[in-house]
Amino acid sequence: MANGFPGLPAAVVQQEEEKTLVKETRMATPAQQKGNHHGQQISLYVKAGSDGESIGNCPFSQRLFMILWLKGVIFNVTTVDLKRKPADLQDLAPGTNPPFMTFNGEVLVDINKIEEFLEERLVPPRYPKLAAKHPESNTAGIDVFAKFSAYIKNPRKEANEGLEKALLKSLKRLDEYLQTPLPEEIDANSVEDPGASTRSFLDGPDLTLADCNLLPKLHIIKIVARKYRGFEIPADMTGIWRYLNNAYQREEFMNTCPAEREIEFAYLDVAKKIK
C-alpha cells in the first residue's frame, strides 16, 4: 500500500485508506513503539496535497503535526482534500478548514488555542514541555513570513526591490538572533568574547513551540522565493542556514513536511509575475 507520508519508516506508520477523500494514518514515534500508550484519542486533520492524499502545503498543519510528534503521543493524521471535503468532516467541524483536531472527542479548531491546550494537557513527566525558556525566541522572525508574502504576491516591478529589501531586513534580524549566544552559552567567568552561538534551534539544543511555528514558514520562504523570484537566503546568514540544516536532520520536521513540489504548486497562482 502506498505510503502517503514519504520518509516515514513502515514500522512507524500503519496506513489505511478510508475513502478517496481522506487518508488516515496512525502515527507512532520510536518512543511510542516501546509501548508508550496512555489512552489519549487524538486525531489531527491536515490539508492534503494536490493528489488529495499526501501532505499539502500548510505551515499551520505542520506546526500542529510537529507539536504532536515532539510530545511523543499516539495520534491519527487525516489528510483532507479541500476540493472534496467529505460530509462527515463538515459535520465534525462545520465551516472549518484544516488544520483542526479532536482530543478525546473534543473538537479543537483554533491553532493557537490547540497549542496551549496540548501544552497544558500533555505535561511532564510523561510528556515533554515544549515552551521556549527565553521569551525572545517566541518573537524571533515574527514578521518574516508577512514580508515574504508581500514580496511574492507583488506584480509591480517598481515595488519589487523595496519589498525584497524589507524581506532581507527581516531575515537579517532573525539571523542576528540565531547568531547571538543565549545566556547559558556564555561563560560568566570568562573575559573572552563568547563568539557566535552554536545552538541548533531558536531556544537552544531542542525543538520548542517557537520552532514549530517558524520552521515551516522559513522552509516555504526558501523554496518559493528561489522558485519564483530567483531569490536565495544569503549564504552569509549563517545563523539561518545552521538553523535550517539542523531542522533537516530531525524527523519531527522532515516527516511532517510537504514535498517541495507541493510547496511550489501551492504558490503557482499566488506568486505574481513581475510586470
Image (cartoon, rainbow, N blue to C red):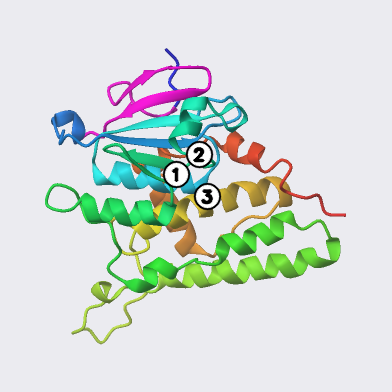
Check residue 62 in the rendering and tell me which mark sits there, or answer none.
Answer: 1
Alpha carbon distance from label 3 to label 1: 11 Å
* Picture layout, residue 275 above or below residue 104: below
* Residue in the picture at 32% in, 57% down: 116
Residue 76 position in % (x across, y down): 33, 31
Q: Amino acid at mark 2?
A: Pro
* Residue in the picture at 61% in, 34% down: 261
Q: Is residue 121 left or right of residue 96?
A: left
- The quarter of the picture where residue 159 lies is bottom right
Q: Which secondary structure lies at badge 2?
A: loop
- Residue with the mark numbered 3: 219
- Residue with the mark numbered 2: 94
Q: Amino acid at mark 3?
A: His
Give the label, 1 or 2, closer to the camera: 2
Q: Are marks 3 and 2 in contact (CB under 8 Å)?
A: no
* Residue in the picture at 57% in, 69% down: 170
Could you tell me which quadrant the N terminus lies in? top left
- The quarter of the picture where residue 72 lies is top left
Residue 206 position in % (x across, y down): 28, 56
Q: Is residue 169 left or right of residue 26?
A: right
